[in-house]
Image (tube, grey):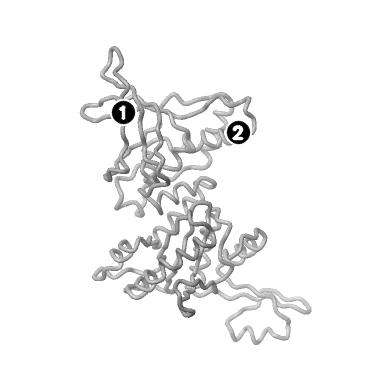
Amino acid sequence: MTGEKELLLKQFRAKNSPYDKISVPIGEMSAYETLGFKVDDTTKKKAKMSRRKNASKEFEDDIWCMFYKLGFRILNTDEHLEVQWGPNPQDTHQLDVVAVGDDAIFVVECKAAEEWKTRSFKDDIDVMSKYQEGVTRTLRQIYGAEKRVKFIFATRKCRVQQAGNDIERLKAHDIYYLNDNTYDYISNLIVSYKDSVIYQFHGLMFKDELINKERICIPALQGLMGTQKYYLFSIEPSTLLKIGFVLHRTRVNDSMAPTYQRLLVPSRLKGISKFIDGGGYFPNSIIINFSASQDNLKTEFKPLGNTLDSKAKFGMLSIPNAYGIAYIIDGQHRVRGIELAMERLQNDPSKVDNNGIS
């Protein structure tokens, strides 16, 4: 494991290519050609050679690069990382990818095939569940007891047998299943969301899990639309981004709820933040939906009294501080655009005008 920036960048450049690249003395070219390397360029003394990575190595490198692009800056340096999970000397396991972030650690087991095939992963999942607790304990001893540790079972070109119970087995052990669709979705998030992608990623990985037990309490106005209650309130974009989740039109979210929005368009953010920097504001609201079924994830409203000529009530709205509980139905560009503008204004307090969102 390393957090050295230069080493990580060097590793990223090597892993971000589908080819293994080496430089060898001219006299050793033939030996490497027998190993599958091809000559790309030569000088008087050296030969630059490359070889296509096999499916397993390429996938592990792609997952490693995914976490690097997500902003993780403590990662394993190669595929030889072994972690002690039990009391006996032989109780160790080689881990494919380990990424340590500010709030969480991710441990990934990668399985890839050269061509599409269907198979059972029962034995692989059973092994993963066996070392899960011990690896969690070891990583927390190193990086902090407060860190979340999330295990991911990632596959490429592998179909899970319909007759098996692999998906249920993964859920039972709280292991996230990342398949080809999920990988493509996260890759698109990285391109679209850039610096704020970590919020959507955490919402995907830890949906409905508490960030902490401290609830978010804000003044709000409760109204009725037919039989449905709604609330009007102001909340900081940075707070909403942590608990918010955008259900995009993608197969990854098919089982979660109706999808609401397309992926964020980065070019629109610049225009929105520039508009706000120039003194502009948005009179319309961000529309979000709280739909948690668990009691500890439900919002609570304590009225302080009715308005004089309305059935609306003013009071305090208590929101659980949890990942992915606030579905952003409309306004994701405005949320991120306002947050970007506020980040720039932090260094110049004279321009801050208590910007929030409603």
Residue lying at 47% horizontally and 74% vertically, measured from the top left: 93
Element on which disc 1 rests: strand
Name the outermost residue toward the top.
309
Q: Amino acid at mark 1?
A: Lys
> Percent from the top left, x then y, of residue 78?
57, 70
In primary-sequence order, the first of circles 1 and 2 is 1
Residue 287 locus on image (x, y percent): 37, 33
Marks 1 & 2, CB-CB < 8 Å contact: no
Question: Which label was assigned to residue 346?
Answer: 2
Q: What whole-number distance in Å separates the C-alpha atoms at marks 1 and 2?
A: 33 Å
- Quadrant where the N terminus is found in the figure: bottom right
> For the residue labelled by badge 2, is the local secondary structure a helix, a strand or a loop?
loop
Vertical position of residue 193 compared to residue 92: above or below = above
Relative placement, left or right, of 136 versus 225 is right
- How many C-alpha atoms fall within 10 Å of the one at disc 2: few (<14), some, or many (≥20)? few
Residue at image location 47% in from the left, 33% down from the top: 236
Seen as rendered, the residue at the extreme front is 87
Task: Pick whichever, 314 or 29, lies toward us.
Answer: 314
Quadrant for residue 86, please give it: bottom left
Placement of 354 over or under 6, stated as above or below: above
Q: Is residue 347 left or right of residue 167?
A: right
* Relative vertical location of residue 208 with respect to residue 58 in this rendering, above or below: above
Give the number of the disc on residue 302. Answer: 1
Disc nearest the viewer among 1 and 2: 1
**Residue 36 vertical position relative to residue 82 in the rendered view, above or below:** below
Mark 2: amino acid: Gln
